[in-house]
Amino acid sequence: MIYVIIEKDCAACGLCEDVCPASAVSSAGIYKIDPALCTGCGECADSCPVEAIQPCQQD
Ligand code: SF4
Ligand code: SF4
């Protein structure tokens, strides 16, 4: 399991980026989690003040 940032809920505060290098701003200024780097630890979800980071089931 990895985590994803729900774009419509994200306030672009940047806290998750401070927590984890897998979370970064894309060229469009939108925060995304790199699925290749995410280990599913959940720390970023705990850091997000608006609960925009949620677990995502992979195929
Ligand atoms: S779940 Fe863990 S590894 Fe994945 S983006 Fe969040 S803090 Fe980083
Ligand atoms: S901590 Fe939450 S609101 Fe802030 S940039 Fe990350 S996903 Fe968006």
Image (tube, helix red, strand yellow):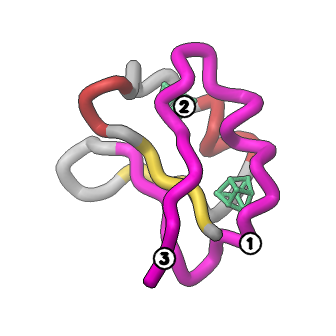
Q: At which x and y percent is residue 40?
A: 72, 64
Give the residue type that dot 3 points to: Gln
What residue lies at 60% left-to-right and 66% top-to-bottom? 2
Residue drawn where x is 63% and y is 77% of the image: 37
Taking the image as shown, residue 15 lies to the left or right of residue 50, namely right
Could you give the CA–CA distance between mark 3 and mark 2, rounded to whole angstroms?
25 Å
Provide residue 46's location: percent of width, then percent of height: 76, 31
Of tags 3 and 1, which is closer to the observer? 3
Percent x, y of residue 42:
76, 49
Q: Earlier in the sequence, mark 3 or mark 2?
A: 2
For disc 3, the marked residue is 58
Pick the residue in front: 13 or 8.
Answer: 8
The Cα–Cα distance between marks 3 and 1, rounded to whole angstroms, is 13 Å
Q: Which mark is residue 39?
A: 1
Q: What number is the disc on residue 14?
A: 2
What's under tag 2, amino acid-wise?
Gly
Looking at the image, residue 48 sits to the left or right of residue 41; the answer is: left
Mark 3 surroundings: few (<14), some (14-19) or many (≥20) residues within 10 A: few
Q: Amino acid at mark 1?
A: Thr
Q: How many numbered marks have been drawn onto this rendered protein structure? A: 3
Crowding at dot 2, Cα within 10 Å, few <14 / some 14-19 / many 20+, comes out as some
- Between residues 48 and 2, which one lies in front from this camera angle? 2
Q: Which residues are magenta?
A: 31-59
Q: Give the SS element for disc 3.
A: loop
Q: Is residue 21 above or below residue 13?
A: below
Q: CA distance from mark 1 to mark 2?
A: 19 Å
Screen quadrant of the N terminus? bottom right
Q: Is mark 2 within 8 Å of ligand 2?
A: yes
**Label 1 beta carbon less than 8 Å to ligand 1:** yes
Labels 1 and 2 touching (C-beta < 8 A): no
Comparing labels 1 and 2, the label whose residue is closer to the camera: 1
Magenta includes 23? Answer: no
